[in-house]
Image (tube, grey):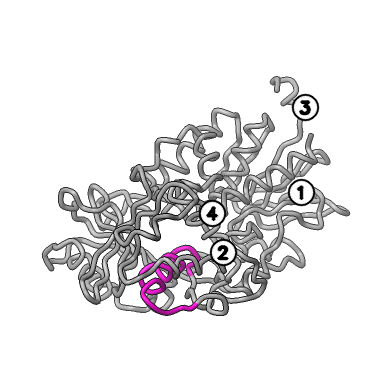
């Protein structure tokens, strides 16, 4: 698209610079459209942010996000912003686990192809499980509208305790038994059901911002996108079937008839801005703990923990970091006592000393919507009843739980719809 043609196009207004908003802005700018990106916070990234922590003296992520090699929206997004090299992980699907109840350790190693011969190999599957139990996962691949996981699967036994429960609580950020069977099925369908080639674990390197945010902002800047941080949207003005203006704290911005608005804000903000919008209203916390201690040589980059407070332990070059999903019950715990409790799990897993290193507890109280059937039913589509207003966010009806992949997918969808009315 020539510069002259670009000058005659209306703008695409993207409000919110989390993963969904960045995804939409990147997709729109990539088609040569003028984009104005506005964000209420002082930094982009939303819940996927990195910052220098004064207590630790380190740059840390607010939380750890595991990406899988089969996350197609992630792959497209990183390619678009030139950050394909910012994810680290093994060449094959390989997950280390430790059960603190009995000290047992094992590796889950699905084979690359979709024919799951790995379940026949005791050295590749969870100890104490047989092939038949894994085949039962096929039940999740069928639609189960409105049903919980515990209405579809047997939520007991070694396979549940040592694989499905930690896997699903991480994916859904909800007690798995009460989670949506359809959302769990979507996760299984996009990962284990496609084989190990789609399940290779990937972690942002060196930080979330360096992988997902900073390259996107640089890319958008090169595309001529206007990026406005610390700019809060206070209201939308409507004229008939379209949004006619955006009321920001710093002034009113008219929306032309050939312009589109992508609203990529949290659900509790969206429901205040969009009349009559129904959205998830029940949320779950995620808690992360960071410890300033360089891991020993050869430490596993990531270990799943069964039977402890920690659920996933990540070993970065300068720190250990722990993620605990569905963590509402821990929010009011004494921070130091909680840090000592979590550090105790790291000590047992990695064979370290009990001395507590400098630590930081990070709580995300409304990290995701509760992935229950009732909340899933409240997720709105990308469309709205206004012809030029589109929604983006992992809380919209992406077919996935609240994940980076879902957020990026929602941004792609919103951008495609905005393009359809602007071209």
Front tag of 4 and 3: 4
Front tag of 3 and 2: 2
Instruction: Please report whichever mark, 1 or 4, sits nearer to the chain's N-terminal start.
Output: 4
Front tag of 1 and 3: 3
Residue 341 visible in the current orientation: yes
Q: Which quarter of the rendering shows the C terminus?
A: top right
Report the disc number at residue 305: none
Residue 170 part of the magenta-drawn span: yes
User: Which residue occupies 55% across, 39% down?
Assistant: 76
Residue receiving disc 2: 185
Within 10 angstroms of label 3, few (less than 14), some, or many (20 or more) residues? few
Give residue 366's position: percent from left, percent from top: 50, 68
* SS at circle 3: loop
Give residue 171's position: percent from left, percent from top: 48, 63
Residue receiving disc 4: 190
Give residue 350's position: percent from left, percent from top: 18, 61
Q: Quadrant of residue 374?
A: bottom right
Instruction: Please report whichever mark, 1 or 3, sits nearer to the chain's N-terminal start.
Output: 3
Residue receiving disc 3: 8
The residue lying toward the viewer, choosing from 373 and 277, is 373
Mark-to-mark CA distance, 4 and 3: 41 Å
Mark-to-mark CA distance, 1 and 3: 19 Å
* SS at circle 4: helix
Residue receiving disc 1: 245
User: Which residue occupies 31% across, 62% down?
Assistant: 122
């Amino acid at each position: 698209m020539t510069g002259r043609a670009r000058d005659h196009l209306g703008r695409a207004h993207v409000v919110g610079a989390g993963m969904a908003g960045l995804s939409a802005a990147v997709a729109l700018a990539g088609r040569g459209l003028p984009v104005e990106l506005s964000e209420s916070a002082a930094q982009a990234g939303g819940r996927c942010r990195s910052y220098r922590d004064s207590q630790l003296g380190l740059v840390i992520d607010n939380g750890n996000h595991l990406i899988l090699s089969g996350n197609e929206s992630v792959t497209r997004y990183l390619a678009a912003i030139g950050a394909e090299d910012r994810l680290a992980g093994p060449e094959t699907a390989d997950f280390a686990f430790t059960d603190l109840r009995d000290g047992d350790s094992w590796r889950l190693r699905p084979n690359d192809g979709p024919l799951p011969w790995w379940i026949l190999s005791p050295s590749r599957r969870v100890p104490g499980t047989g092939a038949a139990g894994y085949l039962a996962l096929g039940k999740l691949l069928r639609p189960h509208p409105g049903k919980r996981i515990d209405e579809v699967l047997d939520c007991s036994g070694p396979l549940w305790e040592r694989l499905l429960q930690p896997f699903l609580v991480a994916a859904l950020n909800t007690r798995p038994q009460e989670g949506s069977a359809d959302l769990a099925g979507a996760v299984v369908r996009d990962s284990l059901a496609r084989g190990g080639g789609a399940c290779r674990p990937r972690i942002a390197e060196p930080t979330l911002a360096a992988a997902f945010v900073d390259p996107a902002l640089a890319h958008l800047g090169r595309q001529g996108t206007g990026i406005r941080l610390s700019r809060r949207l206070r209201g939308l003005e409507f004229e008939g079937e379209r949004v006619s203006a955006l009321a920001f704290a710093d002034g009113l911005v008219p929306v032309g008839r050939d312009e589109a608005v992508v609203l990529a804000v949290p659900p509790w903000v969206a429901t205040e801005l969009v009349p009559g919008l129904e959205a998830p209203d029940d949320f779950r916390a995620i808690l992360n703990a960071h410890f300033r201690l360089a891991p020993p040589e050869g430490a596993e980059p990531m270990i799943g923990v069964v039977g402890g407070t920690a659920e996933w332990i990540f070993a970065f070059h300068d720190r250990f970091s722990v993620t605990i999903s569905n963590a509402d019950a821990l929010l009011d715990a004494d921070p130091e006592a909680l840090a000592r409790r979590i550090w105790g799990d790291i000590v047992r897993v990695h064979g370290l000393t009990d001395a507590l290193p400098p630590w930081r507890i990070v709580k995300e109280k409304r990290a995701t919507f509760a992935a229950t059937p009732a909340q899933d039913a409240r997720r709105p589509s990308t469309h709205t009843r206004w012809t030029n207003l589109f929604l983006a966010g992992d809380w919209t009806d992406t077919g996935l739980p609240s994940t980076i992949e879902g957020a990026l997918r929602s941004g792609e969808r919103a951008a495609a719809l905005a393009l359809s009315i602007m071209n």
